[in-house]
Image: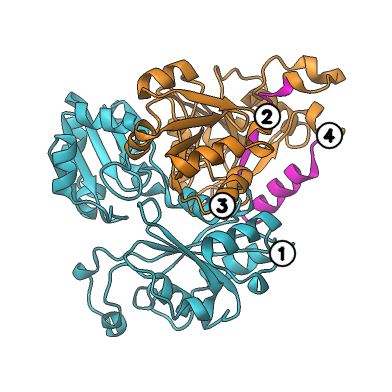
Chain colours: A orange, B cyan
Amino acid sequence: MLTFIGLGLYDERSITVEGQDALREADHAFAEWYTSELIGTTVDDLEAYHGIEIEVRDRPGVEQDPEDILAAAETGDVAFLTAGDTMISTTHVDLRLRAHDRGIETRVIHGVTAQTATSSLTGLQNYRFGKATTLPFPYAHGADGLPSSVTETIDANRAANLHTVVYLDIKVDRATRPGQNDEQQYDSPYMTGDVGASLLAERYPELLGVVIARAGSPDPLVEAAPLATLAEGDFGDPLHILVIPGTLHLLEADALCALAGANREDLEVV
Amino acid sequence: MLTFIGLGLYDERSITVEGQDALREADHAFAEWYTSELIGTTVDDLEAYHGIEIEVRDRPGVEQDPEDILAAAETGDVAFLTAGDTMISTTHVDLRLRAHDRGIETRVIHGVTAQTATSSLTGLQNYRFGKATTLPFPYAHGADGLPSSVTETIDANRAANLHTVVYLDIKVDRATRPGQNDEQQYDSPYMTGDVGASLLAERYPELLGVVIARAGSPDPLVEAAPLATLAEGDFGDPLHILVIPGTLHLLEADALCALAGANREDLEVV
């Protein structure tokens, strides 16, 4: 049995009770932190809290060489752990399909995702979000200006009056990448809200943005302001996410004023 | 302190460990089941499992008359519980803002949502979902044919090559509504996947749909087929959700074939 368990967003207690029970009963546990990380804990703390040894794999150790994970799942109960929900993007669908092909039973125990927390903390209605996008570091993107994938998504959603979640790049494995000229100007592997806002402000300086910092932690921060203003902000520890709202319903505007410090005059209300 | 705690999708163990800890430490706990329900448990079982009395409120008891919830939160720790994530739609933002206005500290402990589980169980990539929509029972919709909110959302998403989550109507409180003529033909307050598919098949008989049943439970079911075929299906116990995919990436198509029983020839692959 191969059980994919989402650890949720922050620390060793962000997992569901069901996930915790399955993890504690597993014979082997593997984890990967290359798609995201839990900021509020360490592998040592996770191991101590749940009473199980966790083997952390890099990307090649999951995607190219999962043989021993699958072999362990053929004869015992294996837990495969990631931040958030393990299957929310297609990253680990391949591993699930490989297991399926070998007749190994698989199961998914869901975790809280950044998408959920983003809607929940901002007061922006989950029904009113369009397609999401990811803003890469310029050194990863490799070309001048904003990627068209980002601007086209924001523009199409705004034209349809929808909100856009802009995931900010994470380059946990960048130490292994060939150095590029402008990489040095970013001192964190996590793109922060102010960096994301400054990149977007080149094109949309007046547009309202919402930074969500440390979603899922005990001290999340939500701040709404024009992107050029957010670009000057400091939102503390990672992880950060940006939202570009469409026009707002009245209750959404009330929430951004009360919970995110927005100025009413900066908001476009339907 | 007023802590909004999402219970997740299925039973008393779908809550996060953090949520469980907060619930067990609360002085008072309130819950509402009118936006959704936990199919795998009862209030009695929740109370016994978490060792706390839970007062269940109907919609007027939350939205019109929350005075005693707020009063309790002024002097003690109050937990407010819902299925999924409490703040994912704006339903309870109003209660949070009322607390905020009275100087009561609020906190959100997130829960797993149907949106997360839908992407995760189908293998459809979360980035490729557009706006979501809800398919109402015809008696609730009150007009002939599909609501334009549903068809316009599906059509716009498909034109942009995006997947659509179609939430299926829940009328837990319909016993209190004035009876309408065709209400009697539905014997469950939860719209099932076959009923949802049959309503959509009037307009889109050949279109691929994916039914997700019992997301978040130990025995979820995922089935992909043309809507006219799904309309003849039986997907077992609730809750059910429908997805209308856009054209598929290869790995998404592989996942629907392996995990959802799709026929390769029914799939539109990019």
- Label number found at residue B269: 1
Q: Amino acid at mark 1?
A: Val
Residue at the disc numbered 2: A197
Mark sitting earlier along the chain (2/4): 4
Magenta part of the protein: which range?
Answer: A145-174
Q: Tell me: residue B129, above or below residue B234.
A: above
Q: Amino acid at mark 4?
A: Gly
Judge depth for marks 1 and 2 and give the one in front.
1
Task: Tell which subunit mark 4 falls on.
Answer: A
Position of residue A72 measured from the top left corner of the image (x, y, whole percent):
50, 37
Q: Is residue A168 magenta?
A: yes
Q: CA distance from mark 1 to mark 2?
A: 35 Å
Q: Amino acid at mark 2?
A: Ala
Q: Tell me what residue is drawn at x 55 percent, y 17 percent.
A: A236
Q: CA distance from mark 2 to mark 4?
A: 13 Å
Q: Amino acid at mark 3?
A: Arg
